[in-house]
Amino acid sequence: VFPRGTDTVTERSQRILDDLVKQLTTWPQYYVIVRGNASLRGDLEANKRLAEQRARAAEQYLISRGVAPHRIRALGSEPSGATSVSFLLGQLPY
C-alpha cells in the first residue's frame, strides 16, 4: 500500500515485498507481473502515471533485493480506486 498520491514504498510494503522476494528465491522458475493501481478521483491521466510509477517502485525494490530484472514485468493499470500494487506469479518468461 502506498501513501495517498505517492509511489513511496513504506516499511509495511517492504515487509510484503520481502516475503515475495523469498517466494521468488524459492521458485526460480516463476516470473511476476506487478500491477500498479491508483485512485479514481482527480485527474485520470495523472492517476494512470501514478499507477505505473507505483508498479515501477515495487519492481525496483524487488530488483534491489536480488530478483533478476528479466523475471519482473511492471505495468500500470487503469485507476481502480486502490492505492496498492498487485502481483501475478506465472511460469512463462516474458
Image (cartoon, helix red, strand yellow):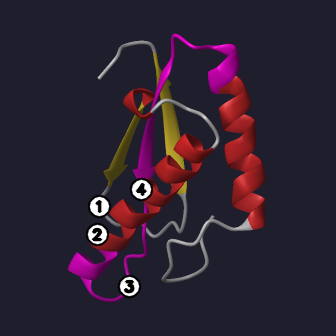
Around disc 2, counting alpha carbons within 10 Å, would you say few (fewer than 14), some (14 to 19), or many (20 or more)? Answer: many
Q: Which mark is residue 41?
A: 3
x and y, in percent, of residue 77 in the image: 32, 56
Tell whether 79 sits left or right of 62.
left
Q: CA distance from mark 4 to mark 2?
A: 13 Å
Label 3 sits on a secondary structure element that is loop
Q: State the residue position of label 2.
A: 48
Between circles 3 and 4, the one closer to the viewer is 4
Q: CA distance from mark 3 to mark 1?
A: 12 Å
Question: Which is nearer the N-term, disc 2 or disc 3?
Answer: 3
As for residue 71 lying within the magenta part, the answer is: no
Q: Which residue range is magenta in the image?
A: 24-48
Q: CA distance from mark 1 to mark 4?
A: 15 Å
Q: Viewer-proximal residue, 39 or 60?
A: 60
x and y, in percent, of residue 32 in the image: 47, 31
Specify the amino acid type for callout 3.
Answer: Arg
Q: CA distance from mark 3 to mark 4?
A: 21 Å
| Residue at the image position 62 percent from the left and 65 percent from the top | 9
